[in-house]
Amino acid sequence: MSAPTDMRHRKLHRLAALIRKETRQMVRDPSSLAMGVVLPLILILLFGFGLSLDVHDVPLAIVMQQPSSDAVGLSEAFRLSSYFQPRFMHALPAAEQLLVSGKVHGILYIPQDFSSRLAVGDAQVQLIVEGSDANSARIIESYVEGAVGTWSAQRAAEGLSGGAAVAGPVNVETRLWFNEADESRYFLVPGLLVLVMTLIGGLLTAMVMAREWERGTLEALFVTPVRSDEILLGKTLPYFMLALAGFVLCVLSAQFLFHVPLRGSLWVLFGASMLYTLVALGIGLLISSAVKNQLVASQLVALTTFMPALMLSGFLFDLRSMPLVVRLVTYVLPARYYVKLLQNVFLAGNVWSVIVPNTAVLALMATGLAFASRAVTRKRLL
Amino acid sequence: MFESLFRIVALTRKELLAVLKDRRARLSLLIPPMVQALIFGYAATYDLNRVPYALLDEDQSAASRELVAGLDGSGTFQRVADLRSAAQIAPAIDSGRALLVMDIRQDFQRQLLAGQQPDVQLIADGRNSNTAGTAMGYVSGIIGNFNAQWRADHGQPAPPMQLIERAWFNPNLETRWYMIPGMIGTLTLIQCMMLTVMSVAREREEGTFDQLLVTPFRPHEIMVGKALPSMIVGTIQATGVLVIAQLWFRIPFAGHYWVLYAGLLLFLLAAVGMGLLLSSIAGTMQQAMLYSMLFIMPFSLLSGFTTPINSMPGGLQQFTLINPLRFAIDITRRVYLQGAGLNLLLPDLWPLALMAAITLTAATWVYRYRPQ
Amino acid sequence: MSSASTEAGAHAQRAPALLARELTRRFTPKDRPVVTALDAVSLAAYHGELTALVGPDGAGKTTLLRLAAGLIAPDGGSLAVLGVDVARDPQQVQDRISYMPQRFGLYEDLSVLENLELYADLHGVSAEQRAQRYPALFEMTALGPFRTRLAGQLSGGMKQKLGLACTLVRQPELLLLDEPTVGVDPLSRRELWEIVQHLVDDQGLTVLMSTAYLDEAERCSRSIVLYQGTVLTQGPPAEVAGGSAGACFLATPPPGQSARSVQAQLLDRPDVVDAVPDGGRVRVVTRGAHGEAAAQPLRGLSAEPVAARYEDGFMQLLQQRVSRERTQPLTIARPLSADSGQLAVRVQRLVKRFGAFVAVDHINFEVRRGEIFGVLGPNGAGKTTTFRMLCGLLAPSGGELYVAGANVRTAPAAARQRLGYVAQKFSLYGPLTVLENLEFFASAYGLRGEAKRARIAWALQQFELGDRAAAVSAQLPGGYKQRLAMAAALLHEPEILFLDEPTSGTDPLARRVFWRRITGLAEQGVTIIITTHFMQEAEYCDHVAIMDGGRVLAQGSPAEIRRRGQSAATPDPRMEDAFIAIVEEARAAAGRDAQAVA
């Protein structure tokens, strides 16, 4: 055997030994298995079912001062809608009391002269919404507008007064591409995947590397022919596999429990996810190699991965509407690119103009992290 | 009794010293919540102020231009492309260049003048359907204005029925007003609970817990001595976020401070109680970390902070009843925005008190009887 | 490759395997002045030899070994290991040497065999070599029966042996060992030594080891004495011992006086370098020159001159450097009546089970007031478990337990106020300063106001902590930590003091001072219960119990225990011989019983 081949052979041999060791430890330590497989599963289930921005069964007080046939007809439209849970009342102050105490989220006030003014084409209906939760409030407003619109269109069709042109003359015909049914779960579940992969990737490696520093196992390991890149790779690969297992479970539940469509190719999904897992593991490795302390490493991972991935990745909140400084911060976050990728692969399909640049950034980040971890993990104690 | 109090003060002092002594540790407890409040305060909004859209104006008439002018003049919508054919719609949306495409058909003006009701088609990128829905809502509003103007200019009657909308507590429906008060609890929960869980696990792992147990400390004194420092840190963190909300984001505070702090203290007590219970079960720091993550993540996501509790399925709504953050967020929002008093907050306060009582008692019990 | 270099090593018999010239290494702790761990040190260790590195805490032993292993970089000078400049090419050195750090980082969740395989793989040991090497390693370490056991479940001594085995999976050109026998019981320590000695004698292994046991240094072919980053002497151990030749005596205490009190009196004299109780008599090293002048301090005692040992020479050597701090024995504010009739601790049929495992198996003993009671035993004998039960940290599974007259099970809080506990590991709050720790523990024991101030001032003065009162505890040197832990445990003037291996890992000087304090306390009526792995230290005790496998094997005064070790081979046994004899006899008996049952 020539010398370089021999060197490479030995290197592989050492790497295999480290991977074997790490895998054994992983399998024997229930907490890392729990973190890699159970935690993601619990999270995706809890959040997949629990997170939704869809508003339904809105408790709504309908205050009708005089139950004229017109007023009753209008209120019927709400009773039949699945969006509302109406409570019929007669006095405004009582309804306002309910609104303040949070028992209803809106009041539809139909005044005494509703019927008579409707006849002359000058009727007013008042909607008071509880505005604290502005997003829900806006959705409630649009639902109420829709219900009132439907009702008046019906009257118009029946040729009654008060029908027709509430909204005219220009009508808006809307189409929501990629998510025709307007299910918030469709975009929340891919986002959750990002959240879960970010957290477990970071936590897994952050804890195991810091643990080796704390327990002093590295001191003896350093004084062997092993190279620091081998130590890092030996750490990364087993946890990479573990994180991928967690990922597969999440994808399966997205498909079969939450019925989120997968319109792009499976290859892109896996390719991008493997890249992102590497980035997440790399962040954990970098943090723990730098601080060498489980307590600090775990706090840092929790602070630098979970909340930013929730708030700044574009998973929930639109990035374009953030101020420039905050937007610049988001460019540093790998989660931002992965959210883009997943929302595309799941909902839109293989849109190469999105996939290529975002994947490229992730690849760049993975490489950068690898070099940084390599630079931080020198075979030195101080 | 007096002796007991004396020992508790000593333990609290020691804990605070141990946590806050190091300048780095001090900063790591105080800075992150405030920085997060600042950044997330800007980020956490469902409101849109930059919506890129593409226009497909097949009519190219005065009326269509007037409609589009309403959009362009709003400040929110930025036209990023003028499309020439329907075939260009898909690329514009797919690439994410435009969030919306407005398609005005060929005989738009003719229909309008003829008293007919032309359709304008809005195609939105549903990859984030919430953002898309909000953007479409904005467009509908602008078209509504156009309609009113058109009717007035062309002598058409106003609609026979008007819906007058008003929003209480947040007249402009700014989500920031809703999000930032919610952060007071959310941002304190993570570090406050982890601090508690880790402080006990660390004493166990470093062997100092034994040294503590051979002193005359009684289990409940240790509990209180461990709970107080975390609560003090939590209160300081919450105050930091509150200061940012008021002085930086200038969100008007409608209630009384003492009501807010009363609610916050009860929340911190419940959260710290849970932390103590977890720490009495966890053997190592790694386990403590895992357990606290297992609780903190669902607590912070299923709290009504980002998505409404009413949108959850029934079973999970029940689950949120053991989530102290859910009540804390409700309290902070209602005191902050609605000026709610204690009587209105009772439904939030008693579950927190109950949680604190149960967890603290259970934790003390486990400490006393836990097999070593 | 390895065979070629062993050959090369054999040729150049006296070529240095390690050569340091003007080697300097400094550390800069946070907000504290720079510490010079090694100050322009020049030294050498030779091929085929066992070289010992000795010296008190903070001498720079670990720093030197870490520099040699390429784990830290020097600030000045040069260090060649196997002819390679370590600073320039640490990897080449790491490829060829083996290193066992003080806390060998075994993977506790891997089995014995898996740990071994890992290191064999990393060193690229071939399958044939393994087939040859493993049986020998298992035979040497007696770990054969445990190859599938997880490393975390091994006793301390077995862990050390496994650590050593991991460094020996192939024949290194140089073996670096950092205090391999700290915290290891005498039995395991002897076994470890036999392994190393065997490898050096039979296979020509080159070893550089640091140790706190001076009898180990005596057995090396070369010793290097470090003190505060400088070399005091290097050469054959006999040279060190020779430094105190003619100044060593064995004094017999006059009737009615204990060896301990005579030793204490002698140690306080300025013309005495060292005094330790030894087999009922007192071994003394005097400052004087040879002959009459040397025996001057011993007038009035019947003393005979004895041959100097390494330890004697070592103490002599250090005395020349250190202006000896005359440690005043501790004085407590209210001396307890040393009414030796009263019982301080009574243990009857005490049992502790963890599942099916019986950690403490029906033990009985009594400790009188003002007594020093020593508990000796191999790692895993149940000593710490017994301690934890005595302190109320662990509920017994059965039996009776009276501490300071109270039943620990029914009145733990009252009993706790009257006892002090110093754990095996430093267990005060690391981030807090010395003063803050003392203040906390004073308050914890209900002290306040003037009383608290007075006690803290007492502790700072008695334990010589005053100059470090504002230092962060975690950053204190080992000796200071141990004193701080003692001070904290004595603030409330307990009647009984529990000390779990307080002298493990501390140097001979610090141990002398420690025992001077302890014996002073006992004289004032404080009851001391202590465990130790230094068998000579048992001589300071009034009574000793030897434990193994959860049972008390022998109990009595040190003299009584020693007598049980008497045999034809050892007519005048030392405590260590007796200990080994008692434990081995009991184990053999247990083995016979097990066989009989089978």
Image (cartoon, rainbow, N blue to C red):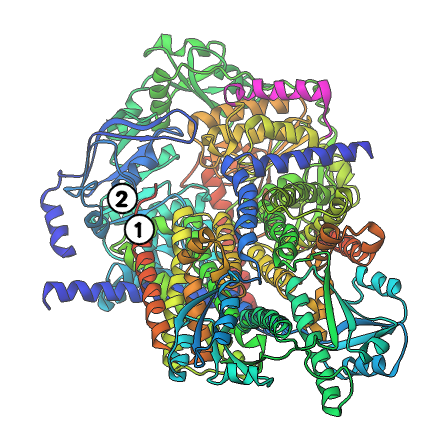
Choose between B245 and C57: the one closer to the eye: B245
Across and down, in percent, residue B218 comes to 75, 42
The numbered disc on residue C69 is 2
**For mark 2, does the 10 Å Cα neighbourhood hold few (<14), some (14 to 19), or many (20 or more) residues?**
many
Write the start and end of the magenta stretch as one range.
Answer: C446-468
Tell me where residue C76 sits by quadrant: top left
Q: At label 1, which amino acid type do we have? A: Phe
Across and down, in percent, residue B329 comes to 69, 56
As displayed, is residue C151 above or below residue A106?
Answer: above
* C139 magenta-colored: no
Secondary element at tag 1: helix
State the predominant SS element of the stretch in magenta: helix
Choose between C280 and B349: the one closer to the eye: B349
Q: Quadrant of the N terminus of chain B?
A: top right
Choose between C212 and B221: the one closer to the eye: B221
Query: Is mark 1 in CB contact (under 8 Å) with mark 2?
Result: yes
**Is residue B18 visible to us here?**
yes
At x 90%, y 67%, the residue is A91
Report whether C44 appears left or right of B259: left
Across and down, in percent, residue B367 comes to 70, 51
The residue labelled by disc 1 is A222
Q: At label 2, which amino acid type do we have? A: Ala
